[in-house]
């Protein structure tokens, strides 16, 4: 798994590339956990280039979502590919996670709520 993080309109945007599974979630949790603990910011996780997610990947997203929400910041998943969308839908998490079509639409939603 590869990643990079940008700052956009007062929000941290995390772009992931590769699979989010048993083998990569430790790295994801280390990096993102550090970001979530030490950053006072809203977060967007762009999953456009994530081809596969398993229960460990879902657990890592839930862990990070919880850390961000505890600080009263917003968290969005964006650009869900078909396989990632189906896994989240099957686990009934598509209604749990805030999801937006794109990074720009997530930023607009945050702006509309006065959160950026």
Image (spheres, helix red, strand yellow):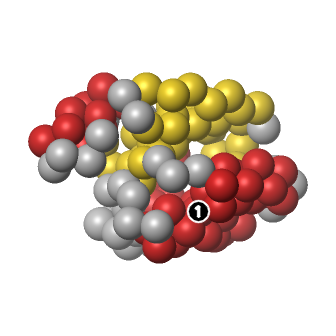
**In the shown orientation, is residue 48 left or right of residue 104?**
right
**52, above or below 46, in the image:** below
Quarter in which the N terminus is drawn: top right
Q: Which residue is drawn at 70% across and 59% down?
A: 33
Residue 93 location (% of width, % of height): 40, 68
* Residue receiving disc 1: 64
Q: Nearer the viewer, residue 10 or 18?
A: 10
Q: Tell me where residue 30 sits by quadrant.
A: bottom right
Quarter in which the C terminus is drawn: top left
Secondary element at image label 1: helix
Q: Which residue is drawn at 18% across and 46% down?
A: 114
Residue 88 visible: yes
CA neighbours of label 1 inside 10 A, class few (<14), some (14 to 19), many (20+)? many
Residue 82 visible: no
Q: Residue at x 65, y 61 (%)?
A: 37
| Number of marks drawn | 1
Residue 8 location (% of width, % of height): 43, 26
**In the shown orientation, is residue 27 left or right of residue 13?**
right
Residue 52 location (% of width, % of height): 64, 46
**41, above or below 73, in the image:** above
Q: Tell me where residue 38 sits by quadrant.
A: bottom right
Q: Which residue is drawn at 51% across and 52% down?
A: 40
Residue 19 location (% of width, % of height): 71, 43
């Amino acid at each position: 798994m590869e990643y990079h993080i940008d700052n956009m309109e007062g929000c941290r945007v995390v772009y992931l590339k590769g699979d989010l599974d048993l083998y990569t979630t430790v790295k994801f949790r280390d990096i993102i956990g550090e970001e979530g603990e030490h950053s006072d910011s809203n977060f967007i996780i762009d999953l456009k280039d994530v081809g596969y997610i398993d229960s460990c990947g879902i657990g890592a997203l839930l862990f990070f979502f919880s850390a961000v929400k505890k600080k009263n910041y917003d968290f969005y998943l964006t650009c869900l590919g078909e396989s990632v969308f189906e896994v989240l839908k099957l686990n009934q998490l598509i209604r749990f996670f805030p999801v937006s079509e794109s990074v720009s639409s997530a930023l607009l939603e945050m702006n509309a709520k006065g959160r950026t």
